[in-house]
Image (cartoon, rainbow, N blue to C red):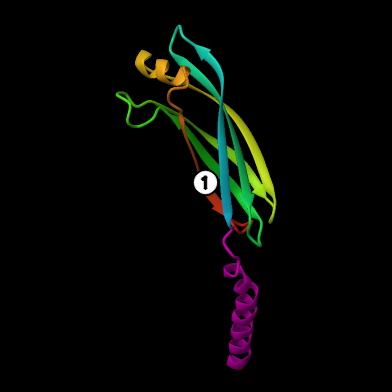
Amino acid sequence: MNYYILIILLGTFFIAGILSCGCNSYAEPDIEINSSVKLVNLSPSDYTITYDISIDVINKGSNNAYDVRAMSIISTPKDLPEYRFAHENIEIGTIPKQETVSVNRRLSLQMTKANYDLLSQGLRDVDVETKITRVSSNIMG
Protein backbone atom coordinates (compact mmCIF):
# COMPACT_ATOMS: atom_id res chain seq x y z
CA MET A 1 0.00 0.00 0.00
CA ASN A 2 2.85 2.42 0.86
CA TYR A 3 4.46 1.70 -2.51
CA TYR A 4 1.33 2.86 -4.35
CA ILE A 5 1.28 6.14 -2.43
CA LEU A 6 4.99 6.64 -3.11
CA ILE A 7 4.51 5.90 -6.82
CA ILE A 8 1.53 8.29 -7.02
CA LEU A 9 3.50 11.07 -5.28
CA LEU A 10 6.56 10.58 -7.49
CA GLY A 11 4.37 10.47 -10.59
CA THR A 12 2.62 13.68 -9.53
CA PHE A 13 5.95 15.47 -8.97
CA PHE A 14 7.26 14.19 -12.29
CA ILE A 15 4.21 15.42 -14.22
CA ALA A 16 4.25 18.78 -12.38
CA GLY A 17 7.94 19.17 -13.22
CA ILE A 18 7.35 18.49 -16.90
CA LEU A 19 4.45 20.93 -17.04
CA SER A 20 6.32 23.74 -15.29
CA CYS A 21 9.73 23.36 -16.94
CA GLY A 22 8.73 25.56 -19.88
CA CYS A 23 7.68 28.49 -17.69
CA ASN A 24 11.23 29.77 -17.24
CA SER A 25 12.35 29.29 -20.83
CA TYR A 26 10.83 32.47 -22.27
CA ALA A 27 13.38 34.89 -23.66
CA GLU A 28 13.03 38.51 -22.59
CA PRO A 29 11.59 40.73 -25.32
CA ASP A 30 14.10 42.94 -27.10
CA ILE A 31 12.23 46.26 -27.13
CA GLU A 32 13.43 49.42 -28.88
CA ILE A 33 11.71 52.80 -28.63
CA ASN A 34 11.88 55.69 -31.08
CA SER A 35 10.06 58.88 -30.21
CA SER A 36 9.70 62.21 -31.93
CA VAL A 37 8.02 65.46 -31.00
CA LYS A 38 6.28 68.11 -33.08
CA LEU A 39 5.00 71.50 -31.93
CA VAL A 40 1.29 71.88 -32.74
CA ASN A 41 -0.03 74.85 -30.76
CA LEU A 42 1.22 77.98 -29.00
CA SER A 43 -0.83 79.66 -26.29
CA PRO A 44 0.87 82.95 -25.31
CA SER A 45 -1.90 83.88 -22.86
CA ASP A 46 -0.91 81.15 -20.38
CA TYR A 47 2.58 80.30 -21.74
CA THR A 48 1.59 76.80 -22.84
CA ILE A 49 2.98 74.89 -25.79
CA THR A 50 1.23 71.76 -27.06
CA TYR A 51 3.21 68.97 -28.69
CA ASP A 52 2.35 65.80 -30.60
CA ILE A 53 4.46 62.88 -29.41
CA SER A 54 4.93 59.97 -31.84
CA ILE A 55 6.22 56.75 -30.31
CA ASP A 56 7.29 53.65 -32.23
CA VAL A 57 7.80 50.57 -30.04
CA ILE A 58 9.67 47.81 -31.87
CA ASN A 59 9.80 44.23 -30.60
CA LYS A 60 13.02 42.83 -32.08
CA GLY A 61 12.86 39.70 -29.92
CA SER A 62 11.84 36.15 -30.72
CA ASN A 63 8.83 36.17 -28.35
CA ASN A 64 5.75 38.33 -28.10
CA ALA A 65 5.85 41.18 -25.57
CA TYR A 66 2.74 41.24 -23.39
CA ASP A 67 1.24 43.98 -21.21
CA VAL A 68 3.63 46.65 -22.50
CA ARG A 69 3.37 50.05 -20.85
CA ALA A 70 5.44 53.14 -21.48
CA MET A 71 5.84 56.60 -20.00
CA SER A 72 6.56 59.62 -22.14
CA ILE A 73 7.94 62.83 -20.63
CA ILE A 74 8.33 66.20 -22.33
CA SER A 75 10.25 68.88 -20.50
CA THR A 76 11.96 72.19 -20.82
CA PRO A 77 15.72 71.82 -21.23
CA LYS A 78 17.27 71.09 -17.84
CA ASP A 79 19.76 73.95 -18.07
CA LEU A 80 17.06 76.65 -18.27
CA PRO A 81 16.24 78.67 -15.13
CA GLU A 82 13.00 76.85 -14.31
CA TYR A 83 12.50 73.19 -15.17
CA ARG A 84 8.96 72.10 -16.11
CA PHE A 85 7.68 68.78 -17.40
CA ALA A 86 4.53 66.89 -18.36
CA HIS A 87 4.15 63.14 -18.65
CA GLU A 88 1.68 60.46 -19.63
CA ASN A 89 1.54 56.73 -18.91
CA ILE A 90 0.62 54.86 -22.07
CA GLU A 91 -0.93 51.38 -22.32
CA ILE A 92 0.50 49.77 -25.43
CA GLY A 93 -0.65 46.17 -24.92
CA THR A 94 0.74 43.18 -26.80
CA ILE A 95 3.48 43.61 -29.38
CA PRO A 96 3.96 40.52 -31.56
CA LYS A 97 7.53 39.41 -32.21
CA GLN A 98 9.34 41.29 -34.95
CA GLU A 99 6.59 43.93 -35.21
CA THR A 100 6.22 47.65 -34.49
CA VAL A 101 3.39 49.41 -32.70
CA SER A 102 2.97 53.17 -33.17
CA VAL A 103 1.27 55.42 -30.62
CA ASN A 104 0.52 59.15 -30.81
CA ARG A 105 -0.23 61.39 -27.86
CA ARG A 106 -0.71 65.12 -27.37
CA LEU A 107 0.87 66.77 -24.33
CA SER A 108 0.79 70.39 -23.20
CA LEU A 109 3.63 71.99 -21.32
CA GLN A 110 3.04 75.14 -19.30
CA MET A 111 6.11 77.20 -18.43
CA THR A 112 7.48 80.58 -17.45
CA LYS A 113 7.49 83.47 -19.93
CA ALA A 114 11.27 83.32 -20.38
CA ASN A 115 11.20 79.61 -21.22
CA TYR A 116 8.11 80.08 -23.42
CA ASP A 117 9.91 82.75 -25.45
CA LEU A 118 12.92 80.48 -26.03
CA LEU A 119 10.89 77.41 -27.00
CA SER A 120 8.17 79.14 -29.03
CA GLN A 121 10.73 81.00 -31.16
CA GLY A 122 12.65 77.79 -31.84
CA LEU A 123 15.79 78.98 -30.04
CA ARG A 124 15.62 75.88 -27.83
CA ASP A 125 13.94 72.51 -28.28
CA VAL A 126 11.78 70.64 -25.82
CA ASP A 127 13.29 67.43 -24.42
CA VAL A 128 11.35 64.20 -24.94
CA GLU A 129 12.05 60.91 -23.19
CA THR A 130 10.09 57.68 -23.45
CA LYS A 131 10.75 54.58 -21.37
CA ILE A 132 9.16 51.17 -21.06
CA THR A 133 7.72 50.86 -17.55
CA ARG A 134 6.35 47.32 -17.83
CA VAL A 135 6.76 44.36 -20.17
CA SER A 136 6.30 40.62 -19.85
CA SER A 137 7.51 37.84 -22.12
CA ASN A 138 4.95 35.41 -20.72
CA ILE A 139 1.22 35.81 -21.21
CA MET A 140 0.80 34.70 -17.58
CA GLY A 141 2.68 37.82 -16.46
Residue 45 magenta-highlighted? no
Q: Position of residue 23 (x, y in %)?
A: 60, 68
Vertical arrangement, residue 79 with respect to residue 109, above or below: below
Q: Which residue is mark 1?
A: 132
Residue 28 magenta-highlighted? yes
Q: Nearer the viewer, residue 20 or 29?
A: 29
19 left or right, relative to 88: right
Q: Position of residue 87 (x, y in %)?
A: 47, 31
Vertical arrangement, residue 42 with respect to residue 34, above or below: above
**Residue ID at (60%, 66%):** 26
Vertical arrangement, residue 73 with respect to residue 31, above or below: above
Q: Nearer the viewer, residue 19 or 114?
A: 114
Instruction: Label 1, secondary structure: give it.
Output: strand
**Residue ID at (64%, 77%):** 18
User: What amino acid type should be assigned to the residue bearing mark 1?
Assistant: Ile
Magenta region:
1-29
